[in-house]
Amino acid sequence: MRISAKGRYALAAATNMAQHHNSGEYVTVLSISKELGISKIYLEQVFSLLKRGGIVISAKGAQGGYLLSRKPNQITAFDVLSSVEDSLFEVTQETVPERAMDIENALRISVFDSLDKAVSDTLRKTTLLDLVNEAERHKGEHEIMFYI
Amino acid sequence: MRISAKGRYALAAATNMAQHHNSGEYVTVLSISKELGISKIYLEQVFSLLKRGGIVISAKGAQGGYLLSRKPNQITAFDVLSSVEDSLFEVTQETVPERAMDIENALRISVFDSLDKAVSDTLRKTTLLDLVNEAERHKGEHEIMFYI
DNA sequence: ATAATTCCTACTCATTTAATAGGATATTGA
DNA sequence: TCAATATCCTATTAAATGAGTAGGAATTAT
């Protein structure tokens, strides 16, 4: 079970946009790709999904770019991830024989559905504002070792 | 984010063994593969992992097979899945540029670590006994429609 | 007009997943 | 002892998925 690079990029990009959100200016994919060290053309595709998911709005052309559609405290990690991952939590499903149906149902109810709920609930608790604050809290932390 | 067929097979097989656990007899991979409708040779590999994970013990040769290593109420879905999936929860990790480190740290702490914990906690709550009971509760449910 | 930007579709490459294949090894029981 | 039954082990294959590239069309500010 893993979170794809796409999901990680989307979260990082959205957090980065939240950091710049007060300026009100459109942010370009290029600038974010540089800041985060992510391939620009790949990030373009991620933003196209974020737009479709209603996380960002866009402006084409020169001086265009992207802007968060809501305030950072009104966008959760769940919103971001589920607009990028086509299904946040998914179980390989195939036809099982009749006699195995009861086990299959038990797994769905007692394991997979609970897992799905746990994941969703967890992701819904964290907003982009939380992420910005947490990032701020850790700022420069990784540089300390060079100063010792 | 998804649970692989391997994980699903492992859970279904372990639950099936739990159903037969009171008999005390070794169960063969062949019989489970028939009952669950899973390829036998693929299921063999799953059982090899379940054994390495300490979920089952094995006996070679005629009249041999597998047996749960502990009572069904002492084996959790977490035990089963984590012995089959090499890492239960995993985030694609790569080197990020220095300036993106604070966001990366925030994501790890506020999203990925929480998710990991939520998933583990959820899976640890459900034992094979729970699954057997849940399966029993649903038994025949899917047949009802033929009798209406 | 031109430069900057989103937007769109198709393609490639590498990795992972699911499944197969074919035996080697061990054990029971006739 | 031998045949049947199982686990055990390693290699291979085929399909799907993931990550990233490529190239250009559409749009807009200056």
Image: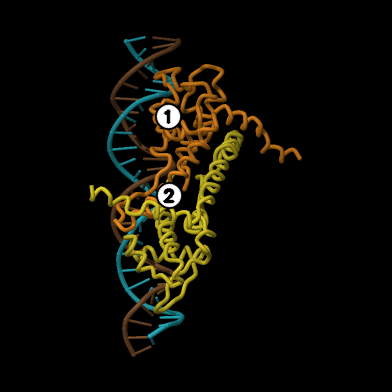
Chain colours: A yellow, B orange, C brown, D cyan
**Chain holding disc 2:** A
A69 over B36 or under it: above or below: below
Three-letter code for the amino acid on which mark 1 is drawn:
Leu
Residue drawn at point x = 39 percent, y = 19 percent: B60
Residue drawn at point x = 47 percent, y = 43 percent: B3
Left of C3 or right of it: where is A90? right
Left of C13 or right of it: where is C18? right
Q: Where does the image place residue A58, in percent across and percent down from the top left? A: 47, 72
Q: Nearer the viewer, residue B147 or C29?
A: B147
User: Label 2 vs label 1: CA separation?
Assistant: 25 Å
Residue on which disc 1 sits: B50
Residue on which disc 2 sits: A3
Q: Nearer the viewer, residue D15 or B142?
A: B142
Left of B134 or right of it: where is A38? left
Q: Nearer the viewer, residue C2 or C18?
A: C2
Please give the label number shown on residue A128: none
Q: Nearer the viewer, residue B136 or A116?
A: A116
Q: Quadrant of the N terminus of chain A?
A: top left
Residue drawn at point x = 34 percent, y = 65 percent: A40
Crowding around mark 2 (Cα neighbors within 10 Å: few <14, some 14 to 19, many 20+) is: some
- Element type at marker 2? strand
Residue sitting at the far right: B148
